[in-house]
Image: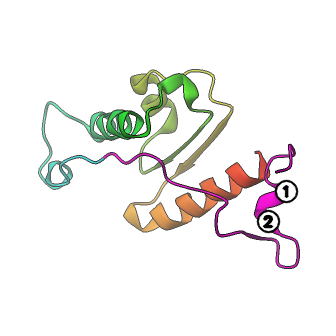
């Protein structure tokens, strides 16, 4: 494989990601009903941080392994601070709700492949 990030993961004829370019290696989730019935002790950021922690454990990673952050409907700076993330070189904040998740995942995949 090439040492140049992403060049071997893009089909040169279509400039599209190849099938094995990106993988989700950890998954974290929380109780979704907490968002519908606000918990005075846990904010959306708290739920996101909990999900991130679970995903990191699932993937066998630590917070210092993260070099990019995308949030949907959460302020990335407040989220990063609460999660203990420091010096993240790539950040993106989507203002919408759940409907932006697919676009955010695609954006993240493109960022990884291109070495952004």
CA neighbours of label 1 inside 10 A, class few (<14), some (14 to 19), many (20+): some
The residue lying toward the viewer, choosing from 49 and 4, is 4
Most common secondary structure along the magenta stretch: loop
Mark 1 vs mark 2, CA separation in Å: 6 Å
The quarter in which the C terminus is drawn is top right
Residue visible at 56% across and 21% down in the picture: 86
In the image, taking residue 34 as reference, residue 5 lies left or right, namely right
* Magenta stretch contains residue 20: yes
The residue lying toward the viewer, choosing from 8 and 91, is 8
* Magenta stretch contains residue 34: no
Please give the residue where the numbered disc 2 appears in the rendered image: 10
Residue visible at 14% across and 30% down in the picture: 41
The residue lying toward the viewer, choosing from 57 and 42, is 57
In the image, taking residue 42 as reference, residue 24 lies left or right, namely right
Please give the residue where the numbered disc 1 appears in the rendered image: 7
Asked where in the image residue 14 lies, by quadrant, the reply is bottom right
State the image coordinates of residue 33 (x, y, percent, origin top left).
14, 54
In the image, taking residue 56 as reference, residue 9 lies left or right, namely right
Kindly state the secondary structure of the residue where label 1 is placed: helix
- Does the residue at mark 1 contact the one at mark 2 (Cβ under 8 Å)? yes
The answer to whether 107 is drawn above or below residue 17 in the figure is: above
Asked where in the image residue 44 lies, by quadrant, the reply is top left
Residue visible at 44% across and 30% down in the picture: 78
The answer to whether 31 is drawn above or below residue 69 in the figure is: below
Give the number of marks.
2
Kindly state the secondary structure of the residue where label 2 is placed: strand
State the image coordinates of residue 38 (x, y, percent, origin top left).
15, 45
Q: Point out the stretch of residues depicted in magenta.
A: 1-28
């Amino acid at each position: 494989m090439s040492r140049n990030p992403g060049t071997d993961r893009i089909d040169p004829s279509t400039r599209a990601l190849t099938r094995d370019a990106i993988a989700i290696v950890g998954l974290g989730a929380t109780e979704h009903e907490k968002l519908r019935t606000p918990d005075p002790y846990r904010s959306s950021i708290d739920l996101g941080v909990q999900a991130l922690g679970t995903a990191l454990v699932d993937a066998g990673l630590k917070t210092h392994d993260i070099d990019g952050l995308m949030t949907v409907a959460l302020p990335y700076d407040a989220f990063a601070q609460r999660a203990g993330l420091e010096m993240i070189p790539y950040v993106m904040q989507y203002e919408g709700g759940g409907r932006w998740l697919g676009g955010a995942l695609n954006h993240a995949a493109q960022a990884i492949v291109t070495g952004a």
